Amino acid sequence: MNKPSIYGLTLDQLYAWLAERGHSKYRASQVWDWLYRKRVTDFAAMEDVHPECIQLLAESFAILTLDEHVKQESADGTIKFLFRLQDGNLIETVLMRHKFGLSVCVTTQVGCNIGCSFCASGLLAKSRDLTSGEIVEQIMKVQLHLDQTGQGEKVSHLVVMGIGEPFDNFKNLIDFIKVVIDHKGLAIGARHITVSTSGLAGKIKEFADLDLRVNLAISLHAPNNELRTRIMKINRAIPIEELMVAIEYFLDKTNQRITIEYILLKDVNDQVEHALELAELIKARPRLAKLANVNLIPYNPVDEHSQYQRSAQESVRAFYDVMKKQGVSVSVRLEHGTDIDAACGQLRSKQIKKAE
């Protein structure tokens, strides 16, 4: 039987787990330090931890449970990892290099049920949620890769934008965040983490109530219900009006800036009238207008979604200019890994097809 990854335990959970078995809080702190500061991958390497505790941990947990199946490296330094889970499923994790540091994009589910018609992640329906340990381990595998290069580089930023809907795996997502922000471990600042959601309104409010200070990004991609329902199935259950109420709740609770993600699809949602409508949607809510930034995202075409194409540069510029003139904060996402399988879920989908 497969053992769960010990990375799935928060520090408080590790304290409690070991305490129930007669071990001290100090012992848990030692183990935590070996895992995240010294980054050992074998319990036996924890030299100053009592042998009885080592045996207990080794009998109950694994440290590494993901196998590197494929690694693609881009000319711009982006690395896309395809990891095989213990049950044979495949997931993607991406390392991106920015001027501000090294960012990792993690996956939270095996497949996705949200049903965005342009997205490679949803080509295969969700088969299960990832455990918190499997999410944390994606960061650790990337960090261990960096450690091997001998350059002293460290993962500094996280984006939860890989395969799956993070808020559909809420508890494991929150445990993952608590592990990576812990100042005694990886110590990645909450403000350096962004979670993207397609718009699960109830979970957005719950996330706001936790006050984790983590950044929130909303995958909107359309300025009205008719168009959004056409390209994003979730809008049938949670229309834009309900989503906006949840967003305003988040802003009132946290006073944090928020990102509105908008993938530009040629002749679908990239016209001047769409830009004007999006600007009005935002400006009608003063707090949103003050705290939102619209991030325009160039589309990475997917073979299975051939009805969608990348917007022309002229359309991107025109959309951007309209938003600027309307007084809305706007940016165009810098692309990474365009010479490899850039779209999220694309590498996984290709590998699964190859194996069939």
Image (tube, grey):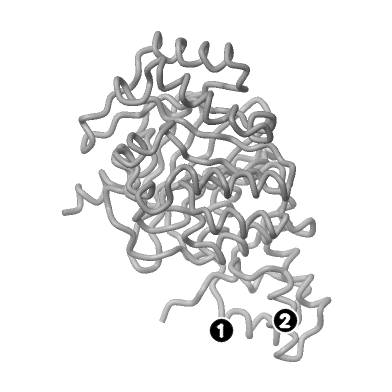
Residue drawn at point x = 46 percent, y = 15 percent: 319
**Label 1 to label 2, Cα distance in Å?**
17 Å
- Mark 2 Cα within 10 Å, few/some/many (few <14, many 20+)? some
Q: Where is residue 108 in the image (x, y as percent from the top left)?
A: 47, 56
Q: In this view, does 130 lie above or below 296?
A: below
- Any mark on residue 59, and which? 1
Question: Which sits in the foreground, 356 or 129?
Answer: 129
The kind of residue on which mark 2 rests is Ala
* 190 horizontally vs 346: left or right: right
- Mark 1 Cα within 10 Å, few/some/many (few <14, many 20+)? few
- In this rendering, the count of numbered labels is 2
* 182 horizontally vs 130: left or right: right
Question: Which sits in the foreground, 77 or 287?
Answer: 287
* 103 horizontally vs 214: left or right: left
Q: Which residue lies furthest to the left in this view?
A: 356
The kind of residue on which mark 1 rests is Glu
Q: In this figure, which residue is indicated by the disc labeled 2?
A: 16
Residue drawn at point x = 65 percent, y = 43 percent: 215
Residue drawn at point x = 75 percent, y = 77 percent: 15
